[in-house]
Image (tube, grey):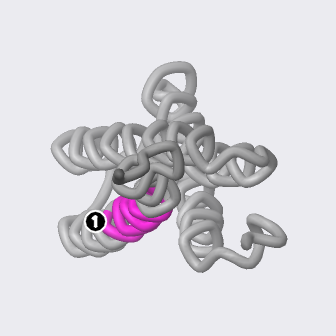
Amino acid sequence: MIKSFRDLEVWQKAHQLTKEIFDLADGFPRRYLFDLTAQLRRAALSIPTNIAEGCATVHSKELVQFLSIAKRSVSEVQYLLFFAFEKDLLREERFREFDERYEELNRMLGGLKRSLQNHQARRLVPFTRHSTLTTRH
């Protein structure tokens, strides 16, 4: 059972990356403030926020939905970083480092989702295979 979102390694990594994205975006030219900078910050912030919000629910199915949103935000951040790299706002080695770390985050979110979905499926199995209403005469 998850006691707090803060206990999850995936949240910790997402939170750290978000702080780094905010620091990175601080260095972008002012002309990108209301488009790229704002969008990148929102997308990055969405990842740990959705993990935290999902952990506040008592239903693992809802948590899976929030993790799916977080995964989509990972893809959004990756694209925005790629765009920043192509606009020469980010050096290649820094872009590659961020991209690798977001790939790891994406895998971790996927693994947590699968684990929750497998747990849900196992809970349903006894009711579908071994019904107590079926008797043999």
Residue positioned most to the top: 34
Q: Position of residue 108 (x, y in %)?
A: 40, 70
Please name the residue shown 38% across and 38% down the image. 72
Is 67 on the left or on the right of 22, as rendered?
left
Q: Is residue 16 above or below residue 127?
A: below
Residue type at mark 1 is Glu
Is 71 on the left or on the right of 53, as rendered?
left
Region in magenta: 107-119
Q: Main secondary structure of the magenta part?
A: helix
Is 130 on the left or on the right of 59, as rendered?
left
Is 36 on the left or on the right of 82, as rendered?
right
Q: In this rendered view, identify the residue nearer to me: 60 or 68.
A: 60
**Res. 109 visible in picture:** no
Label 1 packing within 10 angstroms: few (<14), some (14-19), many (20+): some
Q: Position of residue 64 (x, y in %)?
A: 51, 46
Q: Position of residue 107 (x, y in %)?
A: 31, 67
Q: Quadrant of residue 83?
A: top left
- 41 inside magenta stretch: no
Q: How many marks?
A: 1
Q: Is residue 91 above or below residue 36?
A: below
Locate the N terminus and report the quarter of the image it occupies.
bottom right
Q: In this rendered view, identify the residue nearer to me: 81 or 9.
A: 9
Is label 1 in a helix, a strand or a loop?
A: helix
Q: Give the residue number, with chain letter if any, for mark 1.
A: 103
Q: In this rendered view, identify the residue nearer to me: 1 or 52.
A: 1
**Res. 55 visible in picture:** yes
Please name the residue shown 61% across and 38% down the image. 62
Q: Position of residue 96 (x, y in %)?
A: 22, 69
Q: In this rendered view, identify the residue nearer to me: 113 or 20.
A: 113
